[in-house]
Amino acid sequence: MTVLFLGVGNLQRADDGAGPALAERLAADQSFAKKGIEVQPHSGEGASLMPLWEGADRVVIVDAMKSGKPLGTICRFDAINDTLKPDVFRYSSHLFGLAEATELSRALGTLPKAMIIYGIEGEEFTFGAAMSAQVEAALAEVETAVRKEFADL
């Protein structure tokens, strides 16, 4: 069984660092490795995301989003059943990011068997800025949710 956690974003870009920050925390937890869960930070470049999840049994992804919701809002998407809007996961330096990769994988029939995406509403994406307190707080909630996603392993 292939099980993967991807923390998408850039630690140097304030709220965009939420995904990789969680990947660092989870990678330090030996229980994930013992369960066979591969934990990776990822820049969010879509073309390199697709081969990571192709053929996987279960994938959980955390990324910052910008949807117009209040700062720190958490949204959970079932990527198998929900269509992702490209403008929600737009705060990337890539033109082909998470939403586009997900939808292209759907069209190609290469989505994993199960794929959950947690989006944390960010506000500050400037290079060198600190992550906002609201995103830090949301990240703690998302960490608990991610651990529950893998609790049956």
Image (spheres, grey):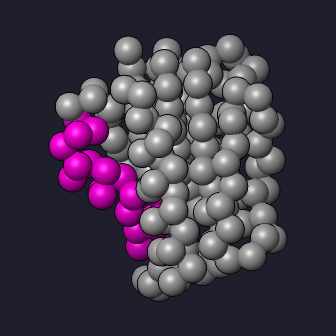
Q: Give coordinates of residue 54: x percent, y percent.
A: 52, 20
Q: Relative to 13, is 84 on the left or the right?
A: right
Instruction: Please tell me how many numbered marks the rendered image carries.
Output: 0
User: Considering only vertical position in the picture, is 19 above or below 42?
Assistant: below
Residue 148 in sight from this viewpoint: yes
User: Considering only vertical position in the picture, is 133 above or below 24?
Assistant: below
Residue 48 in sight from this viewpoint: no
Q: Give coordinates of residue 105: x percent, y percent.
A: 66, 25
Closer-to-camera residue (60/35): 35
User: Considering only vertical position in the picture, is 152 above or below 108?
Assistant: below
Determine which quarter of the picture holds residue 1: top left
Q: Relative to 28, is 68 on the left or the right?
A: right
Q: Give coordinates of residue 3: x percent, y percent.
A: 40, 26
Q: Give coordinates of residue 6: x percent, y percent.
A: 44, 43
Q: Main secondary structure of the magenta part?
A: helix
Closer-to-camera residue (152/65): 152
Range drawn in magenta: 10-33
| Residue at 68% in and 14% down | 109
| Residue at 37% in and 26% down | 153
Examine the structure image and report whether residue 114 is included in the region drawn in magenta. Answer: no
Examine the structure image and report whether residue 26 is included in the region drawn in magenta. Answer: yes
| Residue at 61% in and 44% down | 117
| Residue at 60% in and 37% down | 116
